[in-house]
Amino acid sequence: MASLLTATRLEAQTRALRRLIGNTPLLAVHLRHRGRPLTLYAKCEQVNLTGSIKDRMALHTLERAYGAGEIRPGDTIAEATSGNTGISFAAIGRALGHPVKVFMPDWMSEERKDLIRSYGAEVAPVSRQEGGFLGCIRRAEEFAAGRSDVFLPRQFSNQANVEAHAATTGPEIAAQLEERGLRPGAFVAGVGTGGTVMGVGAFLRARFPGVRIHPVEPAESPTLSTGHKNGQHRIQGVSDEFIPPIVDLARLDAVIPISDGDSILMAQKLATQLGLGVGISSGCNFLAALRVCEELGPQAVVVTVFPDDNKKYLSTDLLREEPVRDGYLSPQVELLGLSTLPPSCAFCPRDN
Ligand SMILES: Cc1ncc(COP(=O)(O)O)c(C=O)c1O
C-alpha cells in the first residue's frame, strides 16, 4: 500500500520529477544515403527518467488530473498499455504515492513486465484470447467501474497526452532548431497512442506553417492506412489494434509505412556504430525521416524522436541476426557521426 503524501510533499516530488523528464538533447545524425550526405534530427527521449518519451505524458496527465481534482492522494492509477506507459505511470505514480495497476498484452517482452513490477506496480497480463489490446482497455474500465478511488489516465483518448507534447516536446524542438538558425521541414513519428505526432505536430504547424507532419506505421501490419488492424509486427509501442481517438488523420500528412525488419536493422546500426542504444521504434522513425528527407531534398530539416532505449528488447529480435530483404533502406545508410543540440534554457524546468 502506498503511503499518502502531504500536499507540500506532493508538490516537491512533482517538481523533482519535472527536472528528470523532458529537456532532452536533439541529435543531429550525419549519414550518407546512396552516396549523398544528409543530416536527420532526433530527440533523445531515451534519457528521460524511465528511459522513454512516455514519462512526459504520464507526468503531464497526473499534473492535469490533480489540477482538475480528478485524482486524489492514494488513488490507484490503472492503465492499459503495451509497456512504456505502464513503466512511466509505475515510476511516477509510485513516486507520488499511488498504487499502480497495469493491464498489458501478455506477448510483450518480459523486460517490460519486470520493469513495471520493479517499481512496485502490479501487472495484469491479458492474452489474445481475452481480447488482446482492446481487452486490456476493457479490463481497466471494468476495474474502475463503480469505484471512486481509481484514476484511469486513458492515454488513447485523453487530450492531456497530446498537450504533453504540444507543451514540451514540440517547443523544445523548435527552440533547439531555432538556436541554430534551422527551420523544420517535416516531423515524423510512429503512432502508438498518437500523442507524440499530434502534440508535436500541432505545435510545429502553428509555429512553422507548411511543416509536414507524418505518422508512421509498420508496413507488415497497417492500421492507420486501412482503418483496422491487419497482421502482426515487431515494433513494440506502435500500431495497436485500432486508430486511437486522439489521432486526427485529417490534420496529418501521408502515413509512412516502414518494415519491422528494416527498423530492427537500423536500430542495430545506431547502437553498434554510434553508441545509440535505442529501441526498434527508433529505427523505424529514423527510416521514416530518411524517406521524407529523400522526398524534400538533402537540405531539408527532418525531425523525429527516439522514443526509448534498447534495454526492454534484450530478449527480442533486436539482439538477433536480422535478414536483409529487398527494398530495405537501412543497408544503404552509412552512418558518419553525431552532433548534439543541447536542451534550450528557454525550457529549463520551472521551479514553481
Ligand atoms: C517504444 C515506443 N515507440 C513509440 C511510441 C508511440 O508514441 P505515442 O503513443 O505518443 O504515439 C510508443 C508509445 O508507447 C512507444 O512505447
Image (cartoon, rainbow, N blue to C red):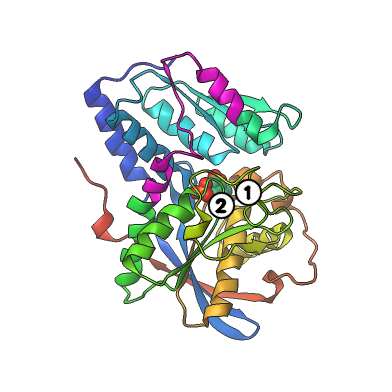
Residue at (54% x, 76% y) in the render: 293
The residue positioned farthest toward the front in the image shown: 250
Label 2: which secondary element = loop
Residue identified by numbered label 2: 191
The answer to whether 201 is drawn above or below residue 50 in the figure is: below
Q: Does the stretch in magenta take in 140? A: yes
Q: CA distance from mark 1 to mark 2?
A: 6 Å
Residue at (72% x, 50% y) in the render: 233
Residue 305 can be seen in this image = no
Mark 1 within 8 Å of ligand 1, using the beta carbon: no
Q: Magenta segment, which residues?
A: 137-165
The reply to whether dot 1 and dot 2 touch (C-beta < 8 Å) is: yes
Label 1: which secondary element = loop
In the rendered structure, which amino acid carries the disc numbered 2? Val
Residue identified by numbered label 1: 239
Quarter that holds the C terminus: top left
Q: Quadrant of residue 265?
A: bottom right
